[in-house]
Image: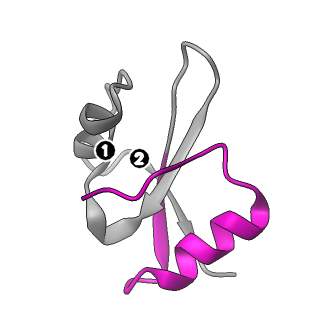
Amino acid sequence: MIEAVKNPSKAEARAIIARSKHGAARQITDHRDGAVWLWPFEQATHAEGAAHLGVPYDRPPGGGDVLLQE
C-alpha cells in the first residue's frame, strides 16, 4: 500500500521522511495540474507510485526525485 500525500506541506514532508525506514521519500509531479505527490521511499518505486496514482511518468529507472532527512 502506498501512503502518498498530495501537495504536502514542509511539515508533512518531514513527517513522511521521518517515518521511512530509509529516512527518505520519493516525489513525483503531475505535469497535467502541477500536483506534487510524496510517499515513504520503501513503499514503491517512482514508476509504481505513478501507476498507482494515475500520474504520467516517463523518467528512466534511477531518475526520480528523492527527498532525504535534513
Mark 2 — residue? Answer: 64
Which residue is found at the position 76% from the left and 56% from the top?
9
Which residue is found at the position 22% from the left and 44% from the top?
48
Coordinates of residue 19 in the picture (x, y in percent)? 49, 83
Q: Is residue 41 above or below residue 34?
A: below
Q: Looking at the figure, which quarter contains the C terminus? A: bottom right
The magenta stretch is 1-27
The kind of residue tagged 2 is Gly
Where disc 2 sits, the SS reads: loop
Q: Is residue 54 above or below residue 41?
A: above
Examine the structure image and report whether residue 11 is included in the region drawn in magenta. yes
Q: Is residue 1 above or below residue 11?
A: above
Coordinates of residue 41 in the picture (x, y in percent)? 37, 67
Which residue is found at the position 34% from the left and 27% from the top?
57
The kind of residue tagged 1 is Gly
Q: CA distance from mark 2 to mark 1?
A: 11 Å
Q: Is residue 6 above or below residue 68?
A: above
Q: Looking at the figure, which quarter contains the N terminus? A: bottom left
Which of the two discs, 2 and 1, labels the residue nearer the N terminus?
1
Examine the structure image and report whether residue 47 is included in the region drawn in magenta. no
Residue at the far top in the pictured view: 32
Mark 1 — residue? Answer: 49
Density class for disc 2 (Cα within 10 Å; few <14, some 14-19, many ≥20) is some
The answer to which of 63 and 29 lies nearer the viewer is 29
Colouring of the image: one colour
Which residue is found at the position 26% from the left and 57% from the top?
44
Where disc 1 sits, the SS reads: helix
Density class for disc 1 (Cα within 10 Å; few <14, some 14-19, many ≥20) is many
